[in-house]
Every structure is written in C-alpha cells, then in structure tokens.
C-alpha cells in the first residue's frame, strides 16, 4: 500500500476487536479518486490560472499595458529600446501601401503580443475578451443545466402526456443544427429590445448570447437525465416511498434529484467547453458579442484580415480557447471517472 494511505490505526482498525476502517462517503470517495488523477489536477490548475489572468485584466491594462484596449490608437507610439515607434507602421510588403500593426514585442509591457489594425494592445484585449468568453460560457452552462435538469426530472418522473409533450419539444430542438439555430436566433434578436421584468435584453447585451447558447443545448443534457430518472422511478427505494404515501414532489426532491446530481456535475465542464466554442463561433460571425465589448471570438474576427502581417492577433485567442476547452474536457473526464460508482480505483 502506498505511503499516502492511512495506517490501520489512523483509519480506525482495531485488531483486538476486528473493527474495519470506516467507509468513505460518496462525495469523499469521489474527491479522493479525483485527487489521484494528475491530469484532472493539472487541468484544474490551468483553468484557475486562466480565470485569474482574466480577472486581473483591468490591472494589466492600467499598470502594464498602459493603454485603453477598447479605444482606437491609430496614431499611438510606444517605446522600444529607448526609441519611439509608431504602433501602426508603414507597410513594407508589395507596393508598401497601408499600415501594418507593430508585431509582438515579447516583453512584460505594452504590446507584448503586438497591436491590431486599430492600434489596440492585443494582450490587454485578450484578457478582457477572456472575461466575457468565460462569463458567457459559465452563465449559459448554469442556465442550460438548470433547464435541462428541471425538464428531465419532470418528464421522467411524471411520464404520460407530460413526458410526451416535453419529449416532442426536445426532439424539435434536437432536430435543428445547433449552430444554425443559434445563428438564426441571434440574427432575429440582435436588433430587438425585449423587456423581461427589470431586465432589458438588447442586441449589445451579453444576456443575449448567454440565453441563446443556454437554451439550444438543453436537449443534449435533458435527454440523458430523463433516461436516468425513468430508471430511478422504478427503483426499490422510490417504490417504497410511494408505498408509504410520500408525496411525489417530495420524492422528486429528496430521492430522485440527489441521485442525478452527480450526472449534472459531470456535464458542467463539458457543456462549458462546448458553450465557449459556440460563443466564439457566434462572435466570429458577428452575431455574438457586439462591439465595443470583446471576446475571444471577436478578437479572432479582428485578426482574420491580419493573418499575413500580424497573425498573433488571431493566434493568441485561438490558443486561449484551445487551452480552456482542453482543460475543461480533461477535468470533465476526471469528474466522470470519480463520480461513476462503477469506476474501479486500484489502491497501492
């Protein structure tokens, strides 16, 4: 047995009376399995680093970049090696027409990753864009999981006409290509102003991509949850509760929901990764985050015309998306293995 394992005495084993070590609870055991997966821990550390980097975006722009990442800086200059250089320099390729943004300076200071065609600091915009991309990904994931869990619980537990109506609605959403549905909803709503109580949903609001992305992926989560609830509905402990006269809503809340909660947790990082990719696609097509706000998708769109002169404008947010999505998927795999009661863990 490995050195990290507790001794029999520490675990509560008493050879004189033959007491076995106390069994770990479900969540404690899952957390212990997760700690034994280095890939999941590394991916979690990468996510924390990315989130913290985006959180300090205002401080980076103020103290390091010393530029406004949202203001045009066409006539700006920066100091390099004691010399003042224009942020947008005269093009040297072809006929020498037009302006070329200054390239990456690879320093901890202004224009570390260069400038875009408006003279804005790419590194500062990358951090600010990450704030919006992560916010949209996380918020839409919460909305998607909440709606999917509620829908799956109701459809699976009550069955009958309720299940049929909900299943038809989910099948209709399922039939649409996701990106086509999201783009269509964005185009229809982007120029509209909708009031939802105290909230005002406008084309430039981040609530628009959050709600659209959160809704279109509901069938992907609701259908597996519905299937699990259908299985749990006929389990012995639910039938026993019904035999004792326990109300259906109480059974749903106290017995069914805790048993599907681990499935919801496993879906969380996977859906967040998918939502970040969807937001980047919508923003790249100009139907997601709207200027002057920025996201990783809008920055890639800005760098599309600079691929031959300043490729880092598009490469930097692309790398950020790849790292974030990869870390979320690896973490999701680790959570699935840790929360799956059928997963085997070899000790020692």
Image (spheres, rainbow, N blue to C red):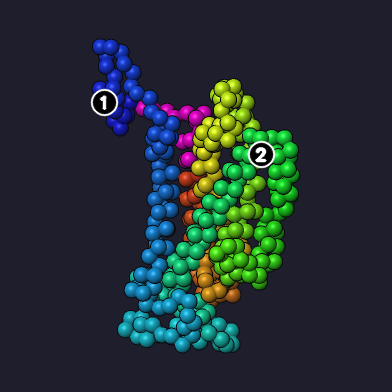
Image location of residue 150, percent across then percent down: 59, 43
Count neighbours of disc 1 (C-alpha within 10 A) and say few if under 14, some if 14 to 19, many if 20 or more: few
Q: Residue at x 28, y 12 (%)?
A: 17
Say above or below: 277 vs 334: below
Distance between the alpha carbons at the discs numbered 1 and 2? 47 Å
Instruction: For marks 1 and 2, give the one nearer the viewer.
Output: 2
Which structural element holds mark 2?
helix
Q: Quadrant of the C terminus?
A: top left
Q: Which residue is mark 1?
A: 10
Q: Nearer the viewer, residue 250 or 214?
A: 250
Residue 3 visible in the current orientation: yes
Dominant secondary structure of the magenta stretch?
loop
Q: Magenta segment, which residues?
A: 334-348
Say above or below: 212 vs 337: below
Whether residue 338 appears in magenta in the rendering, the answer is yes
Q: Which residue is mark 2?
A: 155
Q: Nearer the viewer, residue 161 or 207?
A: 161
Specify whether 54 is left or right of 202. left
């Amino acid at each position: 047995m490995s050195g990290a394992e507790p001794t029999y005495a520490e675990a509560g084993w008493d050879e004189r009376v033959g007491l076995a070590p106390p069994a770990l609870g479900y969540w404690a055991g899952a957390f212990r399995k997760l700690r034994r997966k280095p890939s999941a821990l590394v991916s979690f550390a990468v996510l924390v680093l990315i989130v913290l980097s985006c959180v300090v975006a205002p401080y980076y722009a103020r103290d390091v970049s010393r530029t406004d990442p949202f203001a045009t800086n066409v006539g700006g200059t920066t100091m390099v090696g004691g010399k003042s250089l224009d942020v947008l320099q005269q093009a040297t390729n072809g006929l020498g027409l037009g302006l070329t943004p200054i390239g990456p300076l690879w320093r901890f200071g202004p224009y570390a990753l260069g400038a875009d065609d408006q003279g804005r600091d790419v590194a500062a915009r990358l951090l600010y864009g990450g704030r919006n991309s992560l916010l949209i990904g996380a918020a839409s994931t919460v909305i998607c999981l909440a709606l999917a869990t509620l829908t799956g619980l109701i459809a699976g537990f009550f069955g009958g006409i309720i299940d049929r109506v909900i299943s038809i609605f989910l099948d209709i959403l399922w039939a649409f290509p996701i990106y086509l549905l999201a783009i269509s909803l964005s185009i229809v709503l982007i120029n509209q102003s909708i009031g939802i109580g105290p909230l005002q949903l406008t084309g430039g609001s981040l609530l628009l991509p959050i709600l659209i992305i959160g809704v279109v992926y509901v069938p992907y989560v609701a259908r597996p949850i519905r299937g699990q609830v259908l299985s749990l509905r006929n389990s012995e402990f639910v039938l026993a509760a019904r035999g004792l006269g326990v109300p259906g809503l109480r059974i749903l809340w106290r017995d069914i929901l805790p048993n599907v909660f681990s499935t919801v947790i496993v879906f969380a990082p996977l859906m967040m990764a998918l939502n970040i990719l969807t937001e980047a696609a919508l923003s790249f097509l100009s139907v997601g985050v709207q200027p002057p706000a920025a996201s990783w998708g809008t920055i890639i769109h800005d760098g599309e015309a600079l691929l031959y002169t300043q490729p880092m404008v598009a490469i930097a947010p692309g790398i950020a998306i790849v790292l974030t999505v990869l870390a979320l998927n690896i973490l999701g795999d680790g959570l699935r293995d840790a929360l799956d009661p059928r997963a085997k863990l070899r000790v020692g």
